[in-house]
Image (tube, rainbow, N blue to C red):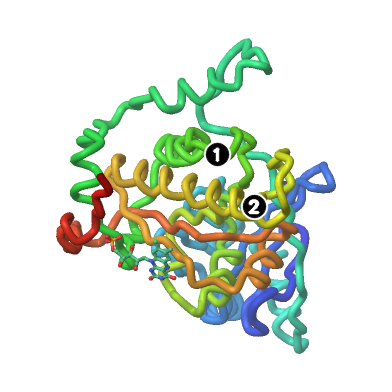
Amino acid sequence: MDFFQVEPAYISKEGCRLIWKGNDEDDQDVIVLSKEELESLVELLSKESTGKVELEDEFSTIWVNTDTTQFRLKEHKMLEVKTQLLRKEILEYKKIPQEQKPIKIYPKEYFPSITIEDEDRTENNKTLDSILGNKDKTVTPESDFFRVIAIRRSTRNFDTTRLVEQWKIDKILAAADTAPTAGNFQGFEVFYVRNKEVKKRLVEAANNQPYVNAPVVLVFCKDPSRVKMNFRPEILAKFSLQDATLAAAYSQIAASALGLSSIWIGMIDEEKVRRIIDTNLIPSSILCIGYPHRNRPPKSRRKLKDLIHVIE
Ligand SMILES: Cc1cc2nc3c(=O)[nH]c(=O)nc-3n(C[C@H](O)[C@H](O)[C@H](O)COP(=O)(O)O)c2cc1C
């Protein structure tokens, strides 16, 4: 990976994107700097001094040394550039007024952290079974089903300093795949949003609910075209909404069973969300997951006798 260039950010005129490119056309790495982060970097570089710039997520840093500048990012391999080159590019970039540059984000294929050797392609359940059965090195929290649902509580206040382990994310995604669906046609798709900028844009598409920018963000979409049943389109649309909703509920419960918390986001501008994640499918909900700042007791419900109507 070689440092390539500085480009304008795509959601704000103030920050920038630093681009590294590999051999392949698609092989590129991008670091997005906010206005403040860019200003701190410019200050160090223009003074020809060395030092550290802390990035927004509290884990990532830029180390400016005399020879080389290192970008140490959370969940990311370290990127480097010659300080002299960075200085030239950044200071030149700052001189000219920049326009926002829209980018297109293409969803990629998902590879779970567990790989199954010699997997027969027809035996999809093998991967699913091993992900669901995986206990990993760390102790799995109490996961008795009834206890999990009894103590589940949504959170809008995530501990963003705690990373969600990849094996837990695998399990949450695999849980979605175990949900029942109409005719087993699986009329839904899940978009697992890792891109920081996309998460920020989803906040705006979700009525500016800031917690949508969570450690793990999953967008559940309806896909009625998968439901190959001979019913009216309204029925297929209803089935795919139910499929996507159930899948999200399975993931939400799986997250709780893994000691995480979540918030279900239904208040979304479907059109905006689909444009942001680059799909033709209609989103049904966003599930935001992470470690909660505080474990709180579950909310109360109405009495069961008021909920249940017995018909004899
Ligand atoms: C269909 C649906 C839509 C929801 N939409 C939102 C939302 O847009 N924003 C939000 O903060 N919470 C949303 N929630 C979360 C609920 O407010 C929360 O689940 C409810 O208060 C019960 O709390 P509990 O999950 O801790 O039991 C939604 C939940 C559901 C099931």
* Mark in front: 2 vs 1: 2
Left-right relation of 211 to 227: left
Name the kind of residue labelled 2 in the image.
Ile
Q: Position of residue 173 (x, y in %)?
A: 49, 40
Note whether residue 281 is visible.
yes
Q: Position of residue 256 (x, y in %)?
A: 30, 46
Q: Is residue 262 above or below residue 132?
A: below
Location of the C terminus by quadrant is top left
Task: Write the residue at 74% across / 80% down.
Answer: 100
Q: Mark 2 points at which residue?
A: 235
Residue situated in front as seen by the camera: 76 or 169? 169
Determine whether the residue tagged by mark 1 lies in a helix, strand or loop. Answer: loop
Q: How crowded is mark 2: few (under 14 residues within 10 Å), some or many (20 or more)?
A: some
Q: In which quarter of the image is ligand 1?
A: bottom left
Determine whether the residue tagged by mark 2 lies in a helix, strand or loop. Answer: helix
Distance from disc 2 to disc 1, alpha carbons, whole Å, reads 13 Å
Q: Position of residue 149 (x, y in %)?
A: 25, 46
Left-right relation of 168 to 301: right
> Do the residues under discs 2 and 1 have CB atoms within 8 angstroms?
no
Task: Write the residue at 43% across / 41% down.
Answer: 172
Note whether residue 52 is visible.
no
**Residue ranking furthest to the right:** 25
Q: Quadrant of residue 54?
A: bottom left
Residue situated in front as seen by the camera: 218 or 305? 305
Q: Mark on residue 181?
A: 1
Residue situated in front as seen by the camera: 37 or 164? 164
Q: In this view, does 263 lie above or below 259?
A: below
Q: Position of residue 116 (x, y in %)?
A: 56, 18
Q: How crowded is mark 1: few (under 14 residues within 10 Å), some or many (20 or more)?
A: many
Name the kind of residue labelled 1 in the image.
Thr
Of mark 2 and mark 1, the one earlier in the sequence is 1
